[in-house]
Image: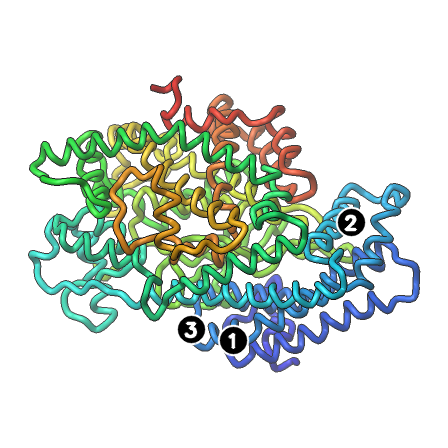
Amino acid sequence: MNENPLLAASGNPFGAPAFDKIENRHYVPAFEQALAEAKAEVDAIIADPQEPTFENTVLALERCGKRLNTVEEIFFNLNEACTDAEMQQIAEQMAPKLTEFSMYVSLSEELFSRVKAVYERRDSLSLSKEDSRLLSETYKSYARNGANLPAADKATFSKLSEELSIASLKFGNNTLGATNAYTLELTQESQLEGLPDFVREAAAEEAATRGKEGWVFTLDHPSFVPFMQYSSRRDLREQLWKAYNTRCIADKFDNEANIRQIVDLSTRRARMLGYGTYADYATEERMAKNKETVLAFVEDMMAKCLPYARKDVADLQEYARSNGFEGQLMPWDFGYWSEKLRTERYSVNDELLKPYFQLETVREAIFNLAETLYGLSFVRREDIPVYHPDVQVYEVRDGARFMGLLYMDFFPRESKRGGAWMTSFRDLSIEDGVETRPLIQLVTNFSKPTADMPSLLTHDEVTTFLHEFGHCLHGLLAEGSYASLTGTSVARDFVELPSQFMENWAFEPEWLNTFARHYKTGEAIPQELIDRLVAAKNYHAGYAFVRQLQFCTIDMAWYTAREVPAASPVEFEHQVLAPTAVMPVIEGTAMSPQFTHIFSGGYAAGYYSYKWAEVLEADAFALFKEKGIFDREVAASFRENILSKGNLEDADVLYRNFRGRDPRPEALLEQNGLSERTK
């Protein structure tokens, strides 16, 4: 055990993982040892001859399996951020064993009877508010994971859960494989027409890294998005767009079977528990409470935003025609012409803005914002091991108090999936009076520095940074005793509030003026450029809203189905989205086969959470706009009532504690210029 860095004490400051010692060969033995320990701990609870109490049953369950949690969090986080074929194989090898153990715990009649016995005496136990919450959440977790099923059905439920875990892993592996498999290799200057220098340089660097001549573009966002925005070569835009939107369709990474299996297994599990659809099951414990509320929310938002989206497309079509474009705008045309019109209308674009957003400067500005609002400090720790040379570690403190470590991993690589996310290597807990603070991971896919240029962020990337940092604050500022109730362990449609709330500062001149300096000259960003950026904030907001609402729509369509649709994923998606289409539908393309959020990322029947939480953040930030965007009193209230509370109370109660009332849904539409008031 002592020779395996996943099982031995790390010896690093704050117990940080020994990433410098962990090798792939350590994972399977660590999993097997940790699983054996966890099972023994569970069996000890079952065998306890004493009457079930909160301490010997509920608290004991919360605290058992600590070593297994550690191994899982390290392995599965790295399998997303720094994986290889061997790790992916280990994930598929261990998934059945982990699911088997999970089902052993959640379907144990002996364990459930003990939990139930404590739960039924809850009113006479004089529990603290936190202990009472842990008891109720533990009981509900058992009920929602099959504990009340007849004995004959539990084996079936367990088998379905195991198969679902494996199918989800395969879906994610296929998506990463398909993304890495494609490159657009260009060798002639004429093929680069319209591309700014920063895009060309990044593509040349990518080519050099791969040992290629010329320029290489990939399906990673820092490469794909600028090409679609700036390339004058419509034929190449079409080629790249189709490559992106045909991933995992009718190729060796095809995800159709995985989608069918995931939807089928999710639905069958939900129906075994007495729910009509998986969406009924998933939404019950969220702020929305039921799928009808979600569907009504999405439908209402779509009805209000669709006219704006159609006007955005019609206006852009007319603009393109006035500039010599013939024919109908296609999906690979929208980004290109939208960027041209945005530049012409507002005289602002990424080429103008990027020089003022050097990654290191933005990072320090975000740290300073956290210090201004919450009194936090961030100190680089180069003595703490990392899992990849790109990663940086920061010690986070609130005055003298240690709050946690923040691992920051910014750049794309083949071993990392696309997108941006926050997660943790360790959550907050208190045991025997000893507090163990969280270890938080922030992962993005920002533009890499090149030989001649530092990493310069687009404004969208600045916003993404703020978004993920908001999640990090939710984890770092957590308070409480139990990992299952702290930090981001909240309702799925509430968890995006802290992240989307932070995005607002990206459009606040008062904050931008504190740091935005040209990376070469050191000159402050011109006020007129900030003014134009703010003026362009709601540019094509209708189109953007409808695009997000379409994601919500297809997600709910998959998971409100009572059985797997007969149509292929491509056909099903086209049928579902046809009434809200604002651009031509391209045969053979779809987003479902690559939609990792809902098929392998935990957002099944939950993608609406982004828009739902945007309503919350728009209403919450309105208070900052009223009192001042750096107001410490409002920030203290947001920290106390939202960021620190975790799942100690229901989300609607937490929000009312902060705002003094329920959120105003109209706040989001007003904020984005999509309401009658803002016409």
Instruction: Report which residue position mark 2 lands on.
Output: 135
Q: Is residue 209 above or below residue 554?
A: below
> Dot 3: what SS?
loop
Q: Which residue is rendered at x = 38% and y = 37% of the image?
A: 506
Q: Residue furthest front?
A: 566
Task: Judge left or right: residue 406 versus residue 517.
Answer: right
Residue 449 in the image, given as x and y percentages of width and height: 28, 58
Q: Residue furthest top?
A: 677
> Dot 2: what SS?
helix
Q: Which circle, 3 or 1, is nearer the viewer?
A: 1
Q: Which mark is residue 84?
A: 3
In-front residue for pair 125/324: 324
The kind of residue tagged 3 is Asp
Binning the other alpha carbons within 10 Å of mark 2 as few (below 14), some (14 to 19) or many (20 upward) gives many
Task: Judge left or right: residue 430 versus residue 511.
Answer: right
In-front residue for pair 124/207: 124
Residue at mark 3 to residue at mark 1: CA–CA distance: 10 Å
Q: Quadrant of the C terminus?
A: top left
Q: Is residue 593 above or below residue 514?
A: below
Q: Quadrant of the N terminus?
A: bottom right
Number of numbered discs on residues: 3
Q: Which mark is residue 90?
A: 1
> Dot 1: what SS?
helix
The kind of residue tagged 1 is Ile
Binning the other alpha carbons within 10 Å of mark 1 as few (below 14), some (14 to 19) or many (20 upward) gives some
Q: Is residue 573 visible?
A: yes
Residue 545 in the image, given as x and y percentages of width and height: 37, 36
Q: Which residue is rendered at x = 70% and y = 76% of the image?
A: 36
